[in-house]
Amino acid sequence: MTIFLILAPFGSFALLMLVTSVEVSLFAAAAICLAVVGIDVYRGRSIKMLGAGCVVLFTGLGAYVALVDPNLSHSAVRLTVDIGVLAISLASLVIRKPFVLQYALEEVDAETAKLPGFRKAIFIITWAWTGAFVLMIAGNVLMIYVPGLPFWSGLAIALAARNSAAYFTTWYPQYRRAKHGAPPANALPGTN
């Protein structure tokens, strides 16, 4: 459910870019981000760096397109969104508070959050998302500078990168638990 809420603004933005104007796509994505922030506040959760940053990103870019440059290409808008999300991710890593940490702390118990490998896993997952954002940027750059590529190829790169990061986000904690979890009660000493 959490990953769905995180990805909802981006999925709706990508879908709306296919069927409506850039302005509508950006402002709708901003509204969905704001709704996700509202859901978190209603549930008593923290306001997430990624959610708040994306509200600013989508709203600011929407205002720019509506007021300054209404002819900004779809590719340039998608590239700007991906660069903005990459900037949020990198900033979270630089300040040593990876954006994934806020979500993880609300999903795990306090004991799990204190485990020695927990923060390392959070950084690894955040780097996986950062890599996905870089791949999405590369796909957009290809669409801009190689105009002969079919439109769906840029979307395929973005979806593959985003879905891979989402899969990794759910797979990696399970892998770490299997690899580093407590041995079964009947295990022999030294066989772990």
Image: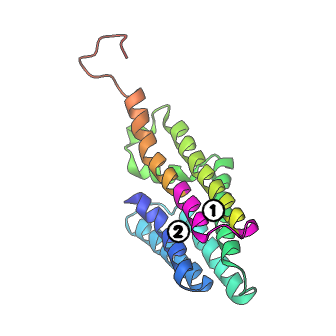
Helix, strand or loop for disc 2: helix
* Magenta stretch, overall SS: helix
- The stretch drawn in magenta includes residue 155: yes
The x, y position of residue 145, in whole percent, is: 76, 66
Image quarter in which the N terminus is found: bottom left
The way the protein has been coloured in the rendering is rainbow
23 shown above or below 187: below
Residue shown at the point (39%, 39%) measured from the top left:
174
Provide the residue designation for mark 1: 85
Residue shown at the point (55%, 85%) measured from the top left:
20
Image quarter in which the C terminus is found: top left
Quadrant in which residue 73 is drawn: bottom right
Q: Which mark is residue 10?
A: 2
Amino acid carrying mark 2 in the image: Phe
Residue closer to the observer: 63 or 133 = 133
Q: Which residues are magenta?
A: 144-161
Helix, strand or loop for disc 1: helix
